[in-house]
Image (cartoon, rainbow, N blue to C red):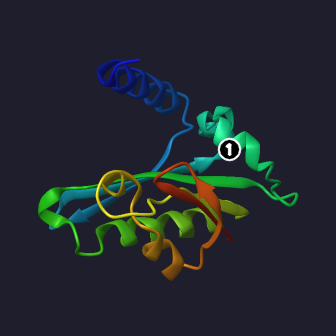
Amino acid sequence: MTKEQMAARNRRDKKVLVENGCSHGILVYSNGQPVGWCQYGPKDELPRIDAGNIYRKLLLGNEGRRLWRITCFWVDRRHRNRGVARTGLKAALKCIGRKGGGLVEAYPASRKGFPADWFDTMSMFKKEGFEIVAPFGKDNVLMRRMV
């Protein structure tokens, strides 16, 4: 699948979630303008991760709790390195808590640069109480925490 095809599929899938009232995300604003975004949601809303070979091999349980995922960040390049992603992460964790909480997974980059632009870095998640569970491919780790 080409990059363009993947982008089109992602837009289509997100549109269906929004139309069904099943999409979760945080928008971060500065002076009334959106400058960042954090996608989160329950496992059933973000199921593609389950299909991946790496994830399936981990054989992780959810300890009988609802499983949430924080899957993606975007920050306007003019606002990077100013805490926008962390603000989005904190807000997502608060929303998850208000919806009953559970086990929260994230997949941050284990090195600087791409894909850190989309997944952010481990240090931000560590500051919010996440712990490393396992390597997750070549450039990421799987981290978890309870909310």
Where on the picture, by quarter, is residue 47? top right
User: In the rendered view, would you say 137 is above or below 90?
Assistant: above
- Residue 46 location (% of width, % of height): 59, 39
Quadrant for the N terminus in the image: top left
User: In the rendered view, would you say 86 is above or below 20?
Assistant: below
Q: Residue at x 44, y 59 (%)?
A: 109
- Confirm whether residue 64 shows in the render: yes
- Residue 75 location (% of width, % of height): 26, 57
Quadrant for the C terminus in the image: bottom right
Disc 1, SS: helix
Quick check: 81 left or right of 73?
A: left
- Confirm whether residue 100 shows in the render: no
Q: Residue at x 60, y 34 (%)?
A: 48
Identity of the residue furthest to the right in this view: 64
Q: Residue at x 54, y 36 (%)?
A: 21
Asked whether 117 or 63 is in front, the reply is 117
- The three-letter code of the residue at mark 1 reads Tyr
- Residue 106 location (% of width, % of height): 56, 58
Where on the picture, by quarter, is residue 112? bottom left
Quick check: 139 left or right of 113?
A: right
Q: Residue at x 81, y 56 (%)?
A: 62
Q: Which residue is mark 1?
A: 55
Pointer 1 local density, CA inside 10 Å: few below 14, some 14–19, many at least 20: some
- Residue 138 location (% of width, % of height): 49, 50
Identity of the residue furthest to the front in this view: 138
Asked whether 84 or 134 is in front, the reply is 134
Quick check: 3 left or right of 45?
A: left
